[in-house]
Image (cartoon, grey):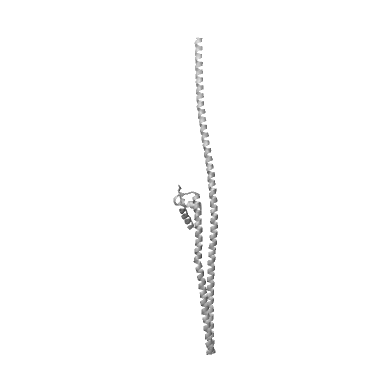
Amino acid sequence: MARKANISKEEIHLACWALLEKNTFPNIPRIAEYFINKDGRKCSNTTLLNAITEWEEIYKEHQQHQLKQLDDVMSPVFQRFNRDVTQSLGKLLDEITFDLEQGLDRKDKAVNGGYLSLSKTLIQCQEELDHSEDKLNQLAQENQSLQEKVETLTQRNQDLAATNNVLTAQISQLQEQHKELVINLAQKDVDLAKIDNELAARNKEYENALRKQQQLEEDNRKLEQENWQKIRQQLDSMNNSINTLSAKHGDKKD
């Protein structure tokens, strides 16, 4: 049998976290069942409601703190991505500028050195330029990929914030529902107590009426017995009188 004992709000808070770890949101019936299954203890719904309401505020602050931590962690990552991309593009522009300057220098030397040397230099410069353009395209693609990752992480952060807002609204709604249920339960307890009192009064009235009826029946039985005894005594007395008269009448005849 469940025993009724005091349960501290700290224990109720720990029970709320335990249920949440099992992907079960805490409420009054689940917390009450948790302690009954754990050690058989029970306490009032008001105690459970107050402790759960306090825990929900703690949980809300915990969620907001986690979102802030995520933002604090991701913000330096985003900044580092942008800085790395900017540095990479700067280095690439420096390399392209250097390659172009070298190509122009070689081109000048090729012009001074003859037509064949110029053609060879132009071909080499074109190859280097093509290689630089390929590298630039590759870096542009990497930059686009990094931007997409940044957008994805930003969207995820926004989704987490929206989810937290939805959970906060649900918690507020559940709190209102809990309060209404507790009020309704208290009213039903009052109504049930009134019915129990009225039923007890009716039972007492019935028992009193039944005892009175039994007493009346017993009194009637005794009265009937007394009446029958009186009637028998009267009959015996009359028989004795008749017998006496008969005896006297017989003596006179003789």
Residue in view at x 52 percent, y 41 percent = 197
Considering only vertical position in the picture, is 248 above or below 199? Answer: above
Residue 208 in sight in this render: yes
Residue 29 in sight in this render: no
- Please state the horizontal and vertical placement of residue 27, each as a whole percent of the image: 51, 53
Considering only vertical position in the picture, is 67 above or below 220? Answer: below
Residue in view at x 51 percent, y 37 percent = 204
Q: How many marks?
A: 0
Nearer the observer, 136 or 244? 136
- Please state the horizontal and vertical placement of residue 202, each as a whole percent of the image: 53, 38
Nearer the observer, 123 or 227? 123
Residue in view at x 50 percent, y 12 percent = 248
- Please state the horizontal and vertical placement of residue 218, each as a whole percent of the image: 50, 29
- Please state the horizontal and vertical placement of residue 114, each as a whole percent of the image: 53, 90
Nearer the observer, 84 or 224? 84
